Each structure stands twice: as C-alpha cells, then as structure tokens.
Amino acid sequence: MSDYFQADLQSEFVAVSNAPISSQQFDADDSAKLALSIAQAGDDRKAGDMLVLRVRDVSYLADYFVVMSGYSNVQVRAIANTIEEEVEEKWERKPLRTEGKAEASWVLLDYGEVIVHVMMPEEREFYNLEAFWGHAERLDFQAYIKGGSEPT
C-alpha cells in the first residue's frame, strides 16, 4: 500500500492581476515589504525579467516568490549577494537556506515567507516557474519601485 492517498481537496481559483501594485497592497504585511526590498536589491544589480508572485493563496511554501534573471554566472552570484546584504542590513535577517551559489546558474534564497530565484535565462526558460505558478497573482512592482518610495 502506498504512503500517498488521494484527498478530496476543493479547487480554489485565484485572480491574476497585471495591474500596477499599489502601496496599499505592499503595506499589508511584512512579507510583502520583504519581497519589495528583495526586488529593489535585484533591480539595483540590473537583474532582468523580474517578477513578484503572490503565492500565499495557492501554496503553503511561501507568501511570495521573487523571480529574476542574471545574464552571467558572475551577475547571478552578485545579485544573490546583494539581496543577502540588503535583507541583512534592512531586515536583520539571513536566509534560512541558500542553494546554488557555487554553480551560480540558479541561486535560491529561502527567507521563509519569501523565496527568491535568481536564474540564468537558460534555466529560467527550461524550468519555466512562471508557467508552473501561472495561477498565482503577478504583481507589477516596477511602478512602485520607480515611484521612489523606500520600503521599510
């Protein structure tokens, strides 16, 4: 007999929004502010194709995923290091777990409620996290970052 069982789980649909994020959405909780700080740190290191996904309604793994691209192993590592430094400085937190820094083709930083993926374009295309988590709400944080508001 298998250790796995088929449960009768209710399906839940989540709205997908590509609308600009308002400060009200990010002020809702600390995990959202942490995700914004991480996105800002990635933006400072010229990360590309940044995406913030609110996965709290569709996954128990985290509240937010922050996904971004680096275009060389050196840039991927630099983005990850900058994120770690910024979060430690502003939030006095270190990641619970870090994976992939040695290879630097996909670095994962796990802050508990926010999981960060810094990936080379080939890995990002192959694993296609955007499609896998396509039912999560996508937040357009670029307008918020460019607006000059400093996350607390």
Image (cartoon, helix red, strand yellow):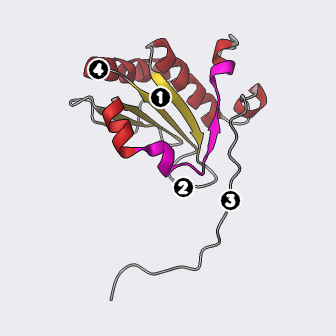
Q: Residue furthest left?
A: 102
How many residues crowd mark 3 within 10 Å: few (<14), some (14–19), many (20+)? Answer: few
Residue 102: % across, % down: 21, 29
| Residue ID at (27%, 18%) | 74
- Give the magenta-colored segment's residue range: 128-144
Q: Nearer the viewer, mark 3 or mark 2?
A: 3
Residue on which disc 4 sits:
72
Spatial CA distance of label 3 from label 2 is: 15 Å
- The disc label shown at residue 60, or none: 2
Q: Toward the viewer: 66 or 111?
A: 66
| Residue ID at (49%, 12%) | 44
Spatial CA distance of label 4 from label 3 is: 37 Å
Residue 151 showing in the rendered view: no
**Mark 3: which amino acid?**
Phe
Q: Is residue 63 left or right of residue 92?
A: right
Mark 3 in CB contact with mark 1 (< 8 angstroms): no
- Dot 1 or dot 4: first in sequence order is 4
- Dot 4 or dot 2: first in sequence order is 2
Residue on which disc 1 sits:
93
Secondary structure at numbered mark 4: loop
Q: Is residue 88 left or right of residue 15?
A: left
- Dot 4 or dot 3: first in sequence order is 3
**Mark 4: which amino acid?**
Ser
Spatial CA distance of label 2 from label 1 is: 21 Å
Q: Is residue 133 magenta?
A: yes
How many residues crowd mark 4 within 10 Å: few (<14), some (14–19), many (20+)? Answer: some
Q: Nearer the viewer, mark 1 or mark 4?
A: 4
